[in-house]
Amino acid sequence: MNLLRLTAMEALEMMGRGELSADELTGAFLDQIDRHDGDVAAYLYVNKTGAREAAAAAGGGDRPLNGIPTAIKDVLCTEGMLTTCGSRMLEGFVPVYTATCVSRLTEAGVVNLGKTNMDEFAMGSSTENSAFGPTRNPWDLDRVPGGSSGGSAAAVAAGEAMWALGSDTGGSIRQPASFCGVVGFKPTYGSVSRYGLVAFASSFDQVGPLTRSVGDAALMLQHLVGKDPRDTTSVAHPEQIVIPEDRDLSGLRIGVISELSGEGIDPGVREVFQKAVSTMADAGAQMETASIPHAEYCIPAYYILAPAEASANLARYDGVRFGLRAGGARDVIEMYEETRSLGFGDEVKRRIMLGTYALSSGYYDAYYGQAQKVRTLVVNDFDAAFREFDLLVSPTTPTTAFGLGERVDDPLTMYMSDICTVPANLAGLPAISIPVGLDGGMPVGMQIMGPAFSANRLLQAAHGAEAAVAFNRVSPLVEERD
């Protein structure tokens, strides 16, 4: 049996029946990492010894996620384990505490396989901005896996992790999930604690799962959501997350967002998406056209607001308290300048400058203030849409995964990779990407969005769509082990 094809739910059932051990399962994934991560580069750090010890300790245990091999995005603090955020600024940094979301999974019994690569400080859409080199897409090693959670998505797609944790600021879970043919879920803002998540843009950032199936996403979410006294923006989720079983889509009224599914979407992606929409209609969903009138302003607003928050959050990296410190400086100001010049990559510097400019005297009202008004308009657009529809859908990305190096020197084109995902972040809404087909041999994702705290409705619909579309393909790196 190819253990790399199993979902977490299937693996737990087999271990419960005594047909599989945590040792065997973890060994299969570590072996796959040894075979292929030299090419894929999904991991920055592989926790080989710790993973084997955890798997051995899991034998005979009764914790709910006992023995499930898990990858952790390197933006989440892990006590005693490197946490670099893909940046030279934090090269060699080892936190003294663990992020709440990681602790909750560990307490539930998962095996931590290691820390995954990412765009530096989560700023990017391709995982090419990592200071430690790019990650490659397991479906085609000459293409990007998406970003910023590209390492986590690639690890799941390559069979190098059963599931993974990522973070989503403007699409950083859903976009790489789409590019790599896996499931990615961004929860409602505040659903999951951000304690221990290294901040990019604090009013946008949210932690979530990348998995093989919608059921696995629900399973992980059961152990992630909930109020944390160490994160004052976290809230008690109003409903208990339920693993979906009903695949019936009848009775659901679903809006297809016209502004995000027409012009600007690659014809091949649009064709696969429209076929999935038709399949959902055949399965009983009432599919109609919906509108988010201010969708065209989402990218400009996001790229003012998020860099503005980043410019403040990244001010803490000054060479004094932790991380890189440039040597030979004549005074403290020169030390600040040289440390930040050496430690930050080009994209991070670009966004710090954008954010600082937007917040500067004389420009605040013209840029930051206006962008906040757009954010309010987008929230109002979604409120109006959800008075008419249960859920909304769009393609997750306008294209399939593009080639390595293809957009590195064209940041504006790179930013447009997030055109379909950013609206949910501006509004703080839950959204999931599921794979629905292939275009030119590369995965295409469908995004489903719901009202705030509608995770169960969203998961049930995604589960039904997953069954109806029946995309059962895996990357060549997993398929070769059959």
Image: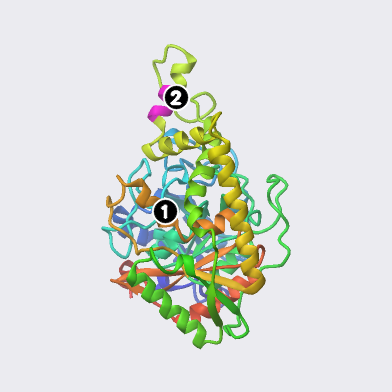
Q: Position of residue 453 (x, y in %)?
A: 67, 63
Q: Amino acid at mark 1?
A: Gly
Magenta stretch, main secondary structure, is helix
First in sequence: mark 1 or mark 2? 1
Residue located 39% across and 69% down the image:
444
Q: Position of residue 353 (x, y in %)?
A: 45, 33
Q: Which residues are magenta?
A: 337-342
Q: Position of residue 480 (x, y in %)?
A: 30, 71
Give the quarter of the figure containing the C terminus: bottom left
Residue located 31% across and 65% down the image:
139
Mark 1 touches mark 2? (CB < 8 Å): no
Whether residue 263 is in magenta: the answer is: no
Disc 2 element: loop
Q: Amino acid at mark 2?
A: Arg
**What is the number of callouts on the image?**
2
Local packing at callout 2 (Cα closer than 10 Å; few below 14, some 14-19, many 20+) is many
Give the quarter of the figure containing the N terminus: bottom left
Disc 1 element: loop
Label 1: which residue? Answer: 147
Residue located 50% across and 82% down the image:
280
Q: Nearer the viewer, residue 308 or 59?
A: 308
Whether residue 341 is in magenta: the answer is: yes
The answer, for residue 428, to whether it is visible in the render is no
- Would you place residue 438 above or below residue 193 in this image? below
Label 2: which residue? Answer: 325
Q: Nearer the viewer, residue 336 or 423?
A: 423
The answer, for residue 126, to whether it is visible in the render is yes
**In front: label 1 or label 2:** 1
